[in-house]
Every structure is written in C-alpha cells, then in structure tokens.
Amino acid sequence: MATYYCPAHADALGLKAGIDTSDLLGTTYQREKHAKHTSTSGSSSEGVRTVFDSNSTAYYAECIRATITHGFVELTGQRKNILFVPSTGSALGVKLNWGVEASKPDTIVVVKTSQASAIHAFLDNSSNYSTSRCAQRGCALW
C-alpha cells in the first residue's frame, strides 16, 4: 500500500532532498528510459508504454526537474516516486496498450530508486491519485 505526502510536507520531511538532477541522461539506463518514453517505436510489442509529446532531451529533463521541485511523493516499500500534475486534464503525451492509444496522461512520474543514477520519468493519469491524501495532515496532494 502506498503512502503519499503533499509537496509541502514532502519537502519538510526531506523526502525529495539529495536528488541529483545535474545529468539526467548521463547513464545508459537513463538514455534507454528517455528513448523508450519519447518514442512509439516498438510499442506494439509492449503491454503498456507512456510516451511524452516531445522527444527533446531538454524537455524530458525539465519535466523531471519540475516534478522534483513541485511534485508530491509516493512511497511504496523501498520505492519512491515523485509525481507532478501540471494541469489536471491537460495531456502531456499518450499511454499505449500494445501500441494502441489508451489515454492521454496528465501526470509526470519520476521514479527514484536506491541507485543515484537510476532516475527516470514516465506518464500516468491524475485520476489514479485523485482520492489519495497526504499522510501527514490529510491535505490534498496537488
């Protein structure tokens, strides 16, 4: 079960501290994730893939930085995700099921694993989080 923290409480608790955003495409892992989430090529062989509207490395990096700055935190076991909804209902890309458009996601999800270089982003729908509340005080997540 996930635990959520709004941006203010996530910052106060240091949940977003120490995340290095200086070189978001510096590793092979990060470049592969960027390529996957900015291209529809090969998506018909995958059950689910989300693709940003732009394949620009600068845009992708800025989405990650904005999410870390403005987003709320989701903790599930050892996993930490940071999510940002720039504008509810405003599509940032497309979600594909076996290469077929399934939805227009409006939420950026930054995955932060225990490895410093294993940060990347994908898209999701804000409706998946609309009823979740901050564990600290029960406030809205965005």
Image (cartoon, helix red, strand yellow):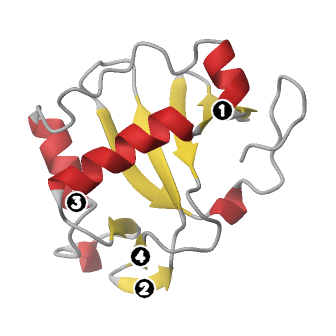
Crowdedness near tag 2: few (<14), some (14–19) or many (≥20) residues, C-alpha within 10 Å? few
Q: Along the polypeptide, which appears first: circle 4 or circle 1?
A: 1
Residue drawn at x 45%, y 59% is 123
Q: Along the polypeptide, which appears first: circle 4 or circle 3?
A: 3
Point out residue 128 in the picture as x, y percentages from the top left corner: 69, 59
Give 82 or 63, whichever is nearer the viewer.
63
Point out residue 12 in the picture as x, y percentages from the top left corner: 67, 14
Seen in the image, is 83 located left or right of residue 134? left
Q: Amino acid at mark 3?
A: Lys
Dot in front, 4 or 3: 4
Secondary element under disc 1, as helix, strand or loop, is helix
Point out residue 104 in the picture as x, y percentages from the top left corner: 50, 77
Q: Residue at label 1?
A: 7
Q: Amino acid at mark 1?
A: Pro
> In the rendered view of the protein, which quadrant contains the N terminus?
top right
- In the rendering, which numbered label is found on residue 101? 2
Crowdedness near tag 3: few (<14), some (14–19) or many (≥20) residues, C-alpha within 10 Å? some
Mark 1 and mark 2: span between their CA atoms?
31 Å
Seen in the image, is 8 located left or right of residue 135? left
Q: Along the polypeptide, which appears first: circle 2 or circle 4?
A: 4
Crowdedness near tag 1: few (<14), some (14–19) or many (≥20) residues, C-alpha within 10 Å? many
Mark 1 and mark 3: span between their CA atoms?
28 Å
Q: Amino acid at mark 4?
A: Val
Dot in front, 1 or 2: 1
Residue farthest to the bottom, as pictured: 100
Point out residue 86 in the picture as x, y percentages from the top left corner: 55, 57
Seen in the image, is 59 located left or right of residue 6? left
Q: Is residue 65 above or below residue 131?
A: above
The image quadrant of residue 127 is bottom right
The image quadrant of residue 76 is top right
